[in-house]
Structures are given as structure tokens and as C-alpha cells.
Image: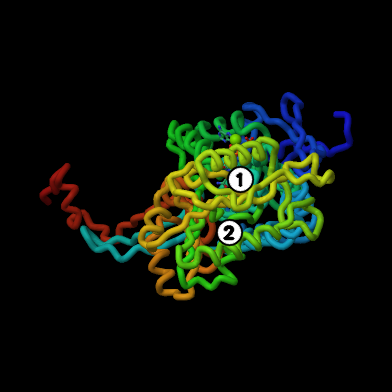
Amino acid sequence: MSDTAPVWNLYINGQWRAPRHEQHDPAYDPSNGTVLAHVARADVEDTRAAIQAARAAFDCGPWATMSPGERSRILHKLVDALEERQAEIADLEMMNGGCTWRKANLMDIPVGLLHFRHFAKLATAEPLEPVPQITFPTLSYNFVRREPIGVCGQIIPWNFPFLMAVWKMAPALAAGNCVILKPASYTPLSALKMMEIIHETGLLPPGVLNLITGPGGVVGPELCTSPLVDKIAFTGSTEVGRQVMIQAASTIKKVTLELGGKSPNIILDDAELDIAIDGSLWATFMHNGQACESGTRLFVPDSLYDKFMDRLLDRASKIKVGLPGDGATDLGPLISAGQLKSVENYIQIGLDEGATPALLGHRPTDPELANGHFLTPTIFTDVRNDMRIAQEEIFGPVLAVIKYDSLEDAIKQANDTIYGLAAGVWSANLERAVSVANKLRAGTVWINDYHLINAEAPFGGYKQSGIGRELGTWGLHEYTEIKHIHADLSRTRQARFWYDILVPTIEE
Ligand code: NAP
Ligand code: MG
């Protein structure tokens, strides 16, 4: 390799290892095209080595059988170590992921650490759950034990690389599983740095946590089909999620999927505009709309429409696209040239479908931005819910505004989608807002806010937005098997009339 960018290898069985074929791929800064690092390209054999390490660690190592208190103590120490070096992680997140300095330092890294800390606390949870007393057909003592599932393959996307890595590994480790994490090829650097920091603590037994970088199309199928892997957790596109589910079926793996969305954001006619307007921009354009639960379909009532839209467009025109490290930048680049093209293609589709470009996005002309994948926000009005720009996930800074007369009709249209990840409702009347929230087919509904994901509350999708939930005890439980233990308390042969079905009682 000719340049001086650092080289990252695979993290397998507590060691850094070069990939078998010694191949590395560049990881870029999407704001200027600089090569930030050369990252190992794993093949199937490398992936198998990581799976075997995790399997051995689970079957023979102390992690799964350690007391919950001890596991929790170790996880807290890992979070302490990550907290100490969070500025390094934030820099990599910004440079490799294209998020702004503000977002990396005020949101992504601190929130990720908070969520990791939450799972360190949950790790102490008593794994035994009582069952009501059972007296029929005889007295028995029954309890449920939550046990780790085993080896978990975890595949994550590029939009929130650090947060997604935490959402996957933290609950899995807290429940006593062993992990193979596969970051997205665009954004492996913050997860690699996390692994370096964790490795340096020396606290995790070898093989408990492994990291494999390389093409999803090579590493993914091996993780999904290996008989040594017990569970796959995937976040990414609905299309790849479907393949993951199909592949995992061959060994009946447990699967959790967090997939795409096209979330509705409904303004009621009594909404408080000061928060609803900036809140709707936050719902859509945060991180350029590269968030699965972005509120990309905005429903605005006829009665408020002109006032609402004038103010929304005025506020949107103030969003500053620029270099992520500049403190004045509101939005950085999109992740890749391919993503930029795909979003521009959707803008053309919107124009062809007859939507009105009330704000039309463009590539900025500033020469400083010439080598990055920058695009200013687009707001389409006169959108019908059956248009492609209202039905398909664009994953870019594009908002589709739909005008409505009747709230019932808005709710019907809001639910008319294959997705069901999230939704927003804005109203000064909480009772009304809750009654709308109850009717929306989505895993999370925010009332008078958006994007607030909490470590204690579940997150996940209805319909084709996914299977299972992340975060909170719901998220932890997705990494457990449930074992029922029945212990007989009667201890007499006479009481067991059902044995007579096979061999009748001996006459004494
Ligand atoms: P993707 O293809 O679904 O990638 C997500 C992860 O899956 C990456 O780690 C990827 O690895 C891996 N992968 C790729 N092919 C795989 C396979 N056959 N089996 C198992 N894993 C595989 O998503 P993307 O290409 O990054 O983005 C495409 C679209 O997905 C976006 O435009 C957006 O609509 C959606 N998306 C949704 C989310 C979300 O949070 N729901 C996040 C990101 C993207 P590589 O990186 O090596 O390909
Ligand atoms: Mg892909």
C-alpha cells in the first residue's frame, strides 16, 4: 500500500489477524474522497475462523456461565474505557460516516455510550422468572431461566455505524452470547476503533467478541447459513433483510431484522407550529434523511397548509450543507457517490410523477465541496401517497408533503405503506394525539417530537420494517432462549396416574 493511511485487520479470537489473502479495501471520507484507512477484506474462510472462535468461546469459555453480576462489571469497565476515548471515536464517525461534528459529538457517540451503559446495567437482571404455582396433575415447582442463545452474527449498516454496533453487541454480550460483528463496508472505522479500545482493556475472554470486515455478499451468507451460528441480527435494507431471512431458514436460526421505513409524520390542525415546523425538518433531514425511521411523508391539514408550508420552506432554506468538521454545518455529505446518484434519481422520479419541487436540491457549487457527495434538501409538495417518492425509501434529504382534509383519511394514507417503523403526531391536545398514535401501524410513535430513541424503550418495526425489537428489556430478551424447568414435588408413584397409560400400577 503506497499511502500512509492505517491498516486495519480482522479481530478474531482476541487477536488482530491479517485476512488470509492479505487483501484490504480503502475506507473513504465521503466529504472529500480521502482514503482514511485500508480495511481487511475477509473471505469465507476468514469468516469461518471468526465463527469457530465465537463457538469455542461460547461452548467452553467462561462468558456464558459467568454470573450476571460479573458480566455486568466487565461491561461497565468496557464502557468506561470507551468513554475515555470517545473523542477519537467521534472523529472517525464524522470522517468516515459524513455526519457533522455536532452530531457525532452531541448525539451519536454519547448516546451510543449511554445505551451501552444501559445494557451493562441490564446484564445484572436475574435470569430466573417465576411461574405461577402448578398443582395439576401433581405439585411441581416451575421456573423459567433465560439463557444466552449462543453465537450471534450481527450485520450493521453505514448510517449510524457506532450506535448500530452498540445496539447489536451490547445486549448480546449482556445476555452472555458470543458475537461476530460485521460492519458496513463504507463505515467500518468507529467499530474497529471500539474493538481496539476493548482489546486493550484485556477484559473480554478471547473469542467472545470478533469483528469481520469485508463484502456483505461474502461474509453475510456464511454467517447466515453456518450451523455454528445460532442467531442473526441484521439492520439494513429490506431487500437484503429478506435474503438474510431466507438464508437463515436453512438452519432455523433466530433472526431479528431492523429494515427500511417510509414513516408518516402527521400535523394535526391544532399543532403548535413553533415546534411542529422545526420538528418536521428534524424528523426528515437529520443526517440527510439517512435514518431508517425518518419522517419522510409529511401530512399537513388543509386548514393550516399555506401558513405551515411558508414557514417550513423558510426554515428549510436556512439548512447549511458543508464540510462536516465546520461547526456551522448543519448537513454533511451523503455516504457515497452511489447513494447521491440514487437520491438524485428519486428527485427526477418525483418531478416525472408530477410532484412540485417547492425546494429543489442540488449539488453545491462551493469548490471546497467538489470532491464530496453533497446535496441540498428537497421538499416536494402536491405529493400523492401512491407516488413512488411517497412509497419507496429514498434514504436521502427528500421530503414528500401530502395535503389532507380529513384526519381519518390522513391516518388511512399514513398506514398505506409496506413499512411500519415509526411515525410522528403533532397536536396541542394530547388525548387527540394519543388516539391517532393508537391507530398508526408502527413500532414507535412520537407525539410532538421525533427521533427520540431511548435505551429503556423498545425500537423496531411492524410489517416489512422488521422482526423483533432492540433496546430495553425487549432488546435484551431477543438475545435469550427461554428454558422452562419443571421439578416434581409429589415424589409418589400412586399420584402419577398417567404412568398407568403405559404400564398399569403393580398390584401389591
Ligand atoms: P444493505 O445492502 O442492506 O447493507 C447493510 C449491511 O448488510 C451491510 O453491512 C452490508 O455489507 C450487508 N450485506 C450486504 N449484502 C448482504 C448479504 N447478501 N447478506 C448479508 N449481509 C449483506 O444496505 P446498503 O447497501 O448499505 O444501503 C442500501 C439501502 O438500504 C439504503 O439506500 C437504504 O434504503 C437502506 N438502508 C436502511 C438502513 C436502516 O437502518 N434500516 C440502513 C442502511 C441502509 P456491505 O456494506 O459490505 O455491503
Ligand atoms: Mg448493499
Task: Name the residue nearer the viewer: 403 or 196.
Answer: 403
Q: What element carries label 2?
A: helix
Residue 487 appears in the picture as rendered: yes
How are the residues colored? rainbow
Residue 61, disc = 1
From the image, which quarter does the N terminus lie in? top right
**Residue furthest to the top:** 21
Residue drawn at the location 46% of the way across and 39% of the way down: 253
Type of amino acid under label 1: Gly
Residue drawn at the location 65% of the way across and 36% of the way down: 341
Cα distance between the residues tagged 1 and 2 = 44 Å
Q: Report the mark closest to the observer, 1 or 2.
A: 2
Q: Quadrant of residue 108?
A: bottom right
* Up-down relation of residue 156 to residue 140 (above or below): above
**Neighbour class for label 1 at 10 Å: few (<14), some, many (≥20)?**
some
Task: Name the residue nearer the viewer: 298 or 84.
Answer: 298
Classify the position of ligand 2 by quadrant: top left, top right, bottom left or bottom right: top right
> Residue 85 at x, y = what percent?
79, 57
* Up-down relation of residue 110 to residue 460 (above or below): below
Q: In this view, does 372 lie to the left or right of 269?
A: right
